[in-house]
Image (cartoon, rainbow, N blue to C red):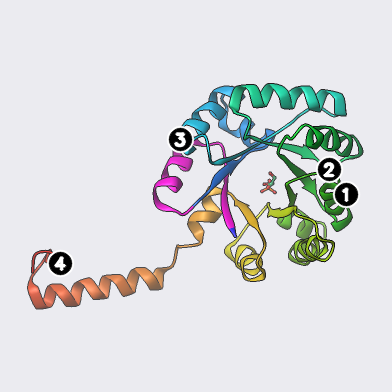
Amino acid sequence: MKFIIDDANVEAIKALYEYFPVEGVTTNPSILAKSGRQPYDVLKEIRGIIGQDADLHVQVVSKKAENMITEAAKMRAELGENTFIKVPTTREGLKAMKALAADGVKITATAIYTPMQAFLAAKAGAAYAAPYVNRIDNLGADGIATVKKIHDIFKNNGLKTEVLAASFKNSQQVQELCAYGIGAATIASDVMEGLIKNDSVVAAVEAFTKDFEGLCGEGKTMENC
Ligand code: G3P
């Protein structure tokens, strides 16, 4: 499972890139709004941090297919041709996906709440389909089961589209989909940090240090004992 950062906070992205095995960044208009910065300013800075080859997913805002297509052209010109264009999986979005895919544009179909939306997006040429785990749960449906079903639909129909699971609120949701072999997950910085936060681990490491220092002296390690 690819791990991607769902954030536009450059400090958080820099920190995660330094410590975590991550492979790209996704944003949406709400995430960009949270940064409080001009979209292309912050996105170019993110591109600079993650490099030209890493996955950067950026969403169109227009509602009509024709405008989504011209937005995509501007985004690719500003941020690089390998930018994944996130297109909401609406009726107009499907039309835009078909046209963009025909031009070789990399598409991430987003705002997915149902397996059939994902299936249609895959058939329309999306490279990734992004179902919203936690938002589906909040509707009283089962986000994890929906994502697993989408994954199975892609495999059973010979579709190359990968699932890019999104909208996580906790480690358990990520773990469940990781165990199932979902292609990718985009995870907010705080949820990503939560994957490794564990008081038992901290206590175990502190006990190792204390025991070793009891043997060799304070501050001693295997480098200088
Ligand atoms: O980009 C869409 C997805 O990441 C939304 O997440 O946390 O706003 O439900 P969230």
Left or right side of 221 for 123: right
Location of residue 106 by image quarter = top right
Of the image marks 3 and 4, the number of the one nearer the N terminus:
3
Left or right side of 72 for 26: left
**Which quarter of the figure is the N terminus placed in?**
bottom right
In magenta segment, residue 13: yes
**Which quarter of the figure is the C terminus placed in?**
bottom left
Which residue lies at the image location 8% right of the left edge and 74% below the top edge?
A: 216
Provide residue 150's location: percent of width, then percent of height: 80, 60
The amino acid type, in three-letter code, at marker 1 is: Leu
The stretch of residues the image draws in magenta is: 2-21
Q: Residues within 10 Å of mark 2 (few under 14, many from 20)?
A: many
Location of residue 40 by image quarter = top right
Of the image marks 3 and 2, the number of the one nearer the N terminus:
3
Q: Residues within 10 Å of mark 3 (few under 14, many from 20)?
A: some
Which residue lies at the image location 27% right of the left edge and 70% below the top edge?
A: 206
The amino acid type, in three-letter code, at marker 3 is: Ile
- Please name the residue that numbered disc 4 is placed on: 221
The amino acid type, in three-letter code, at marker 2 is: Thr
- Please name the residue that numbered disc 2 is placed on: 89
Report if the CB atoms under discs 3 and 4 are less than 8 Å apart: no
Of the image marks 1 and 2, the number of the one nearer the N terminus:
2
Query: Secondary structure beneath disc 2?
Result: loop
Provide residue 69's location: percent of width, then percent of height: 79, 26
**Is residue 22 placed above or below 74 in the rendered structure?**
below
Report if the CB atoms under discs 3 and 2 are less than 8 Å apart: no
